[in-house]
Image (spheres, helix red, strand yellow):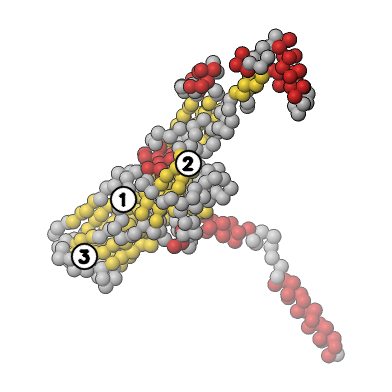
Amino acid sequence: MPLVGSSRSKITRKVIMKKTWKWPKDALVIPIISLCIVFCLTPPVSAQQTDNGGLTGTVTDQNGAAVPGATVTVTNLGTNAKRSTMTNEEGRWTFAVLPLGNYHVTAEAPNFQLARQNVTVVTSETTEANLVLGVAGSEVMVQVDVPQGELAINGNSPTTGTSISGRALEQAPLVNRTPFGRLQTDTGVSGDIADPLTNGNGNPEISINGSRTTSQGTQFNGIDATNFSGTGSLTESISPAPETVQEVRLLSSLYDASLGRNGGGSIQVVTKSGTNAFNGSAYLYAQNEKFNANDFFFNRDGIDRQKARRIEGGFTLGGPIIKDKFWFFGGYQKTDAATAYVPTAQSFVVLPEALAFITNRSNPENVRAAFAMSQRQGGLAGGNFAQSGCVRQQST
């Protein structure tokens, strides 16, 4: 009898286990979809924050005394996203990570009037905004506007470099429309201008502070995009359309240790993002050899202008999906280029006709016989190369 009871107990336990762990076929669908939505809607905050900036500052009264416990609120003017913090005992506040853009900063405290300031957050830099609270009944507003494309000086950081954004990127007079073309205007940067006749991305080979052209690091939205296969860190690398780029920033010296893998400098590219307003653009650029001057030696030899055609067009569009919560931005560009230019070879090579009749070039008799044959067939190859029959071979 005990054996029978034991056997029944074991059978019962197996049945319970089977019923407990039997999942419906669609039970995992909802958790997977929920997890995907969480990852899509979560803002990208990570240890590598080169596509973000920061804000810091102090809150004081009109006598310069620190105001602890004041509430500081920053509002993104494009997306209306808000963040708040409190000042410490020294009246200092900090937002370590903020998306790029224009912000409206306010500070308030009991018995004080609201203080306001407009600032711009740039890549890999903590911008300082100091606010002064007036006594109740008065209002203090400080507005600092930096024109797009101009260099904003940060007195709290030893980092030196250049920031290019806005119209300065889109309207730069560059043949190949690369967003990196204006980096050469920085005092610490040197390099050759990209050849306009080649079918490339137009990125220049630059040297920062005398370093090698391969000693620069490139970050694209916080992702390492440095090229190690070409003659420069930017050549054969990514080259987004200027209409899709929000900011290109060059850090030439004394930048943060997290960017210090390359000794020459750090180049950072951040693309645009959507806002609460719909914005877009459409563009078309064209080049043709008919608008180019012919080469001096081509004119001398009666050679026509070589083919150099490039058509580049595209569009951008951004705006809200859910206002104040979810936005989008995208762009498309197509480049159609054709050229006959070979930068490392001559266009024409002039050779005597007699070379086609030489069968054994190591034998002087065969060489003389070849020139004699050329002369009999109408050429004047009797030793006077200036008047001999010649063949022009075009290289492609």
Identify residue type, mark 1. Ala
Instruction: Mark yes or no: residue 237 visible.
Output: no
According to the picture, the residue beneath numbered tag 1 turns out to be 152
Q: Mark 2, residues whose alpha carbon is within 10 Å: few (<14), some, or many (≥20)?
A: many
**Percent from the top left, x then y, of residue 237?**
54, 45
Q: Quadrant of residue 360?
A: top right
| Residue drawn at (36%, 54%) of the image | 160
Q: CA distance from mark 2 to mark 1?
A: 24 Å
Q: Secondary structure at mark 2?
A: loop
| Residue drawn at (52%, 30%) of the image | 197
Q: Is residue 269 left or right of residue 228?
A: left
Q: Secondary structure at mark 1?
A: loop
Q: Quadrant of residue 357?
A: top right
According to the picture, the residue beneath numbered tag 3 turns out to be 60
Q: Secondary structure at mark 3?
A: strand
Q: CA distance from mark 1 to mark 3?
A: 24 Å
Q: Quick one: 41 or 127, which is closer to the camera? A: 127
**Percent from the top left, x then y, of residue 83?**
35, 60
Earlier residue among tags 1 and 3? 3
Q: Is residue 331 left or right of residue 160?
A: right
Pair 2/3: label in front: 2
Quarter of the C terminus within the rendering: top right
Q: Are marks 2 and 1 in contact (CB under 8 Å)?
A: no
Q: Is residue 272 left or right of residue 131?
A: right
Q: Is residue 30 left or right of residue 260?
A: right
Q: Quick one: 377 or 116, which is closer to the camera? A: 377
**Percent from the top left, x then y, of residue 198?**
54, 32
